[in-house]
Image: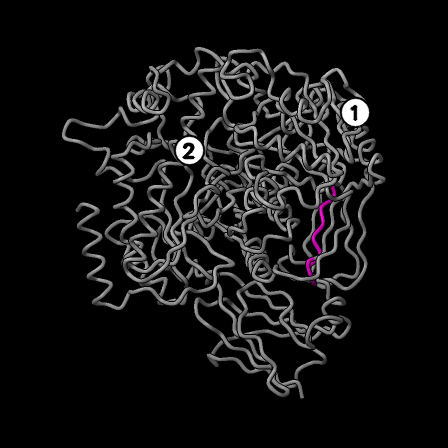
């Protein structure tokens, strides 16, 4: 069945069986799933993103919608189960698959039929047909994920044709020179920008013809991750599209655990790397007001780690995401089937043994407690306890343009981490500033000091330098870390008149600021602001044991020029209303633990205990519900924590009631804050078995029952 015919059939099916769009529902939490609804994966989130369009798509949409979920649809834009496009009578359209110099095709994972495509006009037209059923069946949002072009690709016939069309000159082997590699990456960047522009416009127009609106989003890895993994994607360029409504930040263990270099030591730094990945994703939407969901995956694509390993790294990423209070939307997990119904080795990376196990009961309960809390992160009262705020790091999409032969920039992305990681390790919430959004109003609001380099990235437009010049002259402090040795400084671009002179990209910025590259290693006044040029590459700083200290000395000096004293911590701590989020780091300014006193519910403990003191050693994190804070600011009764989704909380006279729901086979524990112990507890359905225990010292009631994939209503008579 072709997708055109499938779409018409689905539209008729929708009209006959009442699958037309409903009013737009809430979307603060979502998850993606390729299968049908099952009781074991009924998470109670706002939106179910139904993955993939095939003959079962209409039925899957119907099932999830009947269970009360808003409906989204997701499919890949660079790859997918698109055999009806790629399979031909003669075999396979190899010319349209991303290709290495050796002739080897880039296939997705271990697949022999799903490749990473070159988005030709014919392929774009095909994807338009793929998304039609989602529009016709009333999805409120469509997610086209992972627009990815591998940096080491560029030898397919389709790509050669696109090169000629885009540049008006014959294709060059991308590894023949830095200039050729940069141009190849720039073309890949534009190809997926064009593909998403055309498909999103089609979606909007088709929905409008039916009298509706459909949001268009891109789930994507962070710029940091793509650059380190040697992938090119349009990233912040998509903010140039009126039809683009937002992103899902696909940051999780599998990206954030990628090793990097700090003080000359290479290792995984999942919390810190995750924090910087979320920072970059926020940077793209901050000046534009588009939507953003943070993803945190309780496992990862590599199926060979133990549950203990997954749990530790999940906590690293979810805690790092919660330290960005301006975001309050979350994809609570992808693929719940592989989480709640999968099995994983008891020993990390044990691929030979059959000694595997399903998700531990405590980890399943912890996941549900965290995901229920994520529904309540839009809090007005936010308090930071971190190092100095207002320090930014400038990043550009061109980080992805210099990643392959003949002279790729540092494999560990030290050109970025060399200036960003020391800030995080000193407890400073380093705020990435996306270069491509600098021309948006307010892009530099709240930034006192901006760190930047052109080592490993370049400015796509001179307009960015105009903004930076005005910002510095208006009182901003700029710390430029670069020794000018990057071979990509010589690519044919605007700053050297398309290769006609030897100018470096920073020369244009320095000329505007009225400074010279010879004025290095000392702050220079530029009207009301300051500029400090450190004549060293960030990569060298990352390799040196004393590199972080050298950078931080410059940071302290520049802040001092503005009358600000640098504050550092070995932790980051944040209050979001009643929620306390904290992480203590190793490799930091001290090994001192962080001690928190009060009355807290520990949301990373499946038992949801009340603790009076929480002590975090380096490398430990916490997510706490502060009962004392809630007592001072909230109503007298509330479900403070629960390993299930809680809705419809209400106090009617002396009766406090609420509704719960969650995946079968997961124990629901609810810690309820009350003015006094309830006299009676009733539940519907009335055959629901539950346990209860009153804790007078904390003023909380613990309720326990087995989750059900349907509503359970509890009513507590307080007098």
Contact flag, marks 2 and 1 (Cβ < 8 Å) = no
* Disc 2 packing (10 Å; few <14; some 14–19; many ≥20): many
Q: Could you tell whether 150 is left or right of 205 in the image?
A: right
The answer to whether 566 is drawn above or below residue 229 in the figure is: below
SS assignment at label 1: helix
State the residue in front, 112 or 293: 293
State the residue in front, 467 or 445: 467
State the residue in front, 201 or 686: 201
Q: x, y percentage for residue 266?
A: 65, 25
Q: Is residue 582 magenta?
A: yes
Q: Residue at x 76, y 22 (%)?
A: 545
SS assignment at label 2: loop
State the residue in front, 265 or 272: 272
Q: x, y percentage for residue 532?
A: 76, 26
The answer to whether 285 is drawn above or below residue 559 in the figure is: below
For residue 148, the mark is: 2
For the record, the magenta segment spans 576-584
Q: x, y percentage for residue 658?
A: 55, 76
For residue 550, the mark is: 1
Cα–Cα gap, marks 2 and 1: 36 Å
Q: Could you tell whether 443 is left or right of 7 in the image?
A: right
Q: Earlier in the sequence, mark 2 or mark 1?
A: 2
Q: Residue at x 66, y 29 (%)?
A: 452
Q: Is residue 604 magenta?
A: no
Q: x, y percentage for residue 505?
A: 60, 21
Q: Residue at x 53, y 18 (%)?
A: 408
């Amino acid at each position: 069945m072709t997708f055109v015919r499938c779409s018409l059939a689905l539209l008729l099916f929708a009209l006959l069986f009442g699958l037309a769009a409903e009013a737009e529902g809430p979307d603060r939490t979502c998850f993606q799933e390729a299968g049908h609804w099952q009781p074991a994966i009924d998470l109670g989130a706002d939106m179910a993103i139904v993955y993939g369009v095939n003959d079962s798509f209409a039925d899957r949409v119907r099932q999830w919608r009947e269970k009360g979920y808003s409906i989204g649809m997701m499919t890949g834009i660079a790859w997918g189960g698109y055999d009806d496009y790629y399979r031909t009578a003669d075999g396979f359209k190899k010319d349209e698959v991303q290709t290495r110099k050796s002739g080897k095709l880039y296939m997705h994972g271990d697949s022999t039929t799903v490749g990473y495509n070159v988005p030709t006009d014919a392929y774009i037209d095909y994807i338009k047909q793929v998304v039609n059923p989602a529009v016709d069946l009333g999805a409120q949002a469509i997610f086209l994920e992972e627009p990815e072009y591998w940096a080491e690709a560029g030898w397919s016939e389709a790509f050669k044709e696109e090169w000629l069309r885009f540049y008006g000159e014959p294709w060059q082997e991308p590894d023949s020179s830095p200039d050729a590699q940069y141009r190849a990456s720039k073309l890949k960047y534009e190809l997926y920008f064009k593909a998403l522009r055309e498909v999103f416009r089609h979606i909007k127009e088709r929905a409008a013809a039916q009298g509706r609106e459909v949001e268009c989003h891109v789930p994507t890895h962070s710029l940091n991750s793509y650059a380190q993994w040697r992938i090119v994607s349009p990233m912040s360029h998509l903010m140039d599209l009126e039809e683009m409504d937002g992103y899902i930040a696909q940051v999780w263990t599998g990206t954030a655990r990628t090793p990097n270099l700090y003080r000359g030591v290479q290792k995984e730094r999942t919390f810190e790397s995750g924090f910087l990945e979320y920072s970059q994703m926020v940077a793209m939407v901050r000046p534009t007001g588009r939507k953003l969901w943070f993803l945190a995956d309780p496992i990862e694509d590599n199926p060979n780690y133990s549950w203990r390993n997954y749990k530790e790294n999940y906590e690293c990423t979810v805690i790092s995401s919660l330290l960005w209070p301006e975001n309050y939307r979350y994809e609570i997990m992808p693929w719940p089937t592989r989480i709640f119904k999968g099995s994983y080795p008891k020993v990390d990376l044990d691929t030979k043994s059959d000694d595997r196990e399903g998700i531990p009961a405590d980890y399943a309960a912890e996941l549900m407690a965290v995901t229920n809390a994520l529904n309540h992160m839009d809090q007005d009262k936010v308090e930071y306890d971190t190092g100095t705020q207002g320090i930014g790091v400038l990043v550009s999409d061109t980080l992805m343009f210099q990643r392959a032969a003949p002279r790729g920039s540092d494999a560990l992305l030290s050109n970025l981490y060399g200036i960003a990681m020391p800030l995080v390790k000193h407890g400073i919430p380093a705020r990435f500033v996306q270069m491509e959004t600098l021309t948006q109003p307010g892009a530099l609001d709240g930034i006192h000091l901006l760190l930047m380099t052109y080592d490993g990235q370049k400015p796509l437009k001179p307009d960015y330098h105009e903004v930076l010049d005005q910002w510095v002259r208006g009182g901003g402090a700029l710390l430029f870390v670069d020794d000018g040795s990057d071979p990509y400084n010589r690519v044919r671009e605007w700053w050297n008149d398309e290769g006609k002179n030897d100018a470096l990209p920073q020369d244009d910025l320095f000329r505007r600021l009225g400074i010279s590259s010879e004025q290095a290693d000392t702050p220079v006044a530029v009207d009301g602001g300051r500029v400090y040029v450190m004549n060293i590459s960030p990569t060298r700083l990352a390799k040196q044991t004393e590199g972080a200290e050298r950078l931080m000395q410059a940071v302290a000096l520049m802040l001092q020029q503005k009358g600000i004293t640098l504050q550092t911590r070995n932790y980051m701590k944040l209050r979001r209303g009643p929620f306390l989020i904290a992480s203590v780091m190793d490799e930091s300014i001290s090994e001192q633990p962080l001690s928190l006193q009060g009355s807290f519910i520990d949301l990373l403990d499946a038992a949801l205990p009340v603790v009076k003191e929480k002590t975090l050693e380096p490398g430990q994190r916490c997510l706490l519900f502060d009962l004392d804070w809630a007592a001072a600011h909230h109503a007298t009764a509330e479900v403070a924590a629960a390993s299930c989704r809680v809705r419809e909380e209400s106090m009617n006279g002396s009766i406090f009631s609420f509704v719960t729901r969650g995946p079968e086979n997961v124990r629901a524990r609810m810690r309820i804050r009350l003015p006094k112990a309830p006299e009676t507890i009733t539940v519907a359905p009335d055959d629901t078995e539950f346990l209860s225990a009153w804790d007078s010292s904390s003023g909380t009631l613990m309720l326990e029952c087995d989750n059900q994939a349907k509503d359970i209503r509890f009513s507590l008579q307080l007098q």
